[in-house]
């Protein structure tokens, strides 16, 4: 079971992020984010930048040469996703937890890659999205708030029950315009796997890095640098 939990954790995390945002909430319901505009740039800078295309986003993903030795890229699952049902978290259910069956957020411009590290089951995944800054901020903010608002809940993934625990995690506050981070613990059959997930919005670009906490911390900075550097 150790291998199963480790290899499905990132997929479930991505599926939970794919729940649709509720469009009926008022602006006053929008959760606070970890920070506002970076002190190194004026508030609102780059907010109106045109979204980047998926083709451009793909060139800004980390690759094996950026990560170093010992990393192997995983093949992307493009057609088959386990059904994911959320139990015991009304906030996620309100967002549409029973529809959490996809592997990415519903933005038109996106790119993603995932890697395994060494002989262990450690993984790190990167996702890039581009859209209007307010749309990125609203959607990712609501989802992170819902997930961290439920300390414990259960996910049924492909018929397998997995106990979940979530908590907010620290995130650098001097990068990008907004930041979110959480630790998710997946437990089943007496085995637990911890996944860290950090999101940073920089203007019209959203970066999400997920995986082993140590690997996320190690590669977050270089991922943001490459994602926000024009090529």
Image (cartoon, helix red, strand yellow):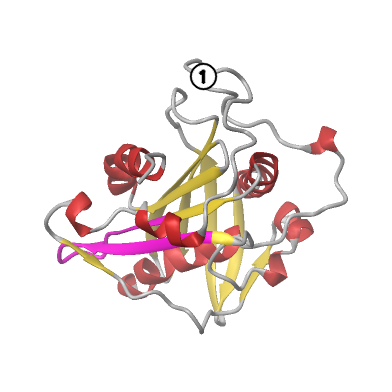
Q: Residue 223: x and y, percent?
A: 34, 44
- Type of secondary structure dominating the magenta stretch: strand
Give the magenta-colored segment's residue range: 110-126
User: How many marks can you see?
Assistant: 1
The percent coordinates of residue 222 (x first, y second) are: 29, 40
Please tell me which residue lies in front, 116 or 41: 41
* Residue at 33% from the left image edge and 43% from the top image edge: 226
Residue 28's x, y, as percent?
Answer: 84, 32
Q: Which residue is mark 1?
A: 41
Q: Nearer the viewer, residue 80 or 147?
A: 80
Q: Is the N terminus in the top left, top right, bottom left or bottom right quadrant?
A: bottom left
**Mark 1 packing: few (<14 Cα in 10 Å), some, or many (20+)?**
few
Confirm whether the magenta stretch covers residue 175. no
Q: Residue at x 37, y 63 (%)?
A: 113
Say if 83 sits above or below 2 in the image.
below
Left or right, 200 with reference to 146? left
Q: Is residue 73 toward the left or the right of residue 69 in the image? A: right
Q: On screen, 189 above or below 208?
A: below
Q: Secondary structure at mark 1?
A: loop
The percent position of residue 118, horizontal first and vertical second, equals 15, 62
78 horizontally vs 142: left or right: left
**Relative to 154, does residue 132 appear above or below in the rendering?**
above
- The residue located at (42%, 28%) in the rendering is 172
Q: Quadrant of residue 93?
A: bottom right
Return the residue found at the far left. Answer: 69
Residue 138 quadrant = top right
Residue at figure coordinates x 47%, y 46% from the top left? 207
Q: Is residue 123 magenta?
A: yes
């Amino acid at each position: 079971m150790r291998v199963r939990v480790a290899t499905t954790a990132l997929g479930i995390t991505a599926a939970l992020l794919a729940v649709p945002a509720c469009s009926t909430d008022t602006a006053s319901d929008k959760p606070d984010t970890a920070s506002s505009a970076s002190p190194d740039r004026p508030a609102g800078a780059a907010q109106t930048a045109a979204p980047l295309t998926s083709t451009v986003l793909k060139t800004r993903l980390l690759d094996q040469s950026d990560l170093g030795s010992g990393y192997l890229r995983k093949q992307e699952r493009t057609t088959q996703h386990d059904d994911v049902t959320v139990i015991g978290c009304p906030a996620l259910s309100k967002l549409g937890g029973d529809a959490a069956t996809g592997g990415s957020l519903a933005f038109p411009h996106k790119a993603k890659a995932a890697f395994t590290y060494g002989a262990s089951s450690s993984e790190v995944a990167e996702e890039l999205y581009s859209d209007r800054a307010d749309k990125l901020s609203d959607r990712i903010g609501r989802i992170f708030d819902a997930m961290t608002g439920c300390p414990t809940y259960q996910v049924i993934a492909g018929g397998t029950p997995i106990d979940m625990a979530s908590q907010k995690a620290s995130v650098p506050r001097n990068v990008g315009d907004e930041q979110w981070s959480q630790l998710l613990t997946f437990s089943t059959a007496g085995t637990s796997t911890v996944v860290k997930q950090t999101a940073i919005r920089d203007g019209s670009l959203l970066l999400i890095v997920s995986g082993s906490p140590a690997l996320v911390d190690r590669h977050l900075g270089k991922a943001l640098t490459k994602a926000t550097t024009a090529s």
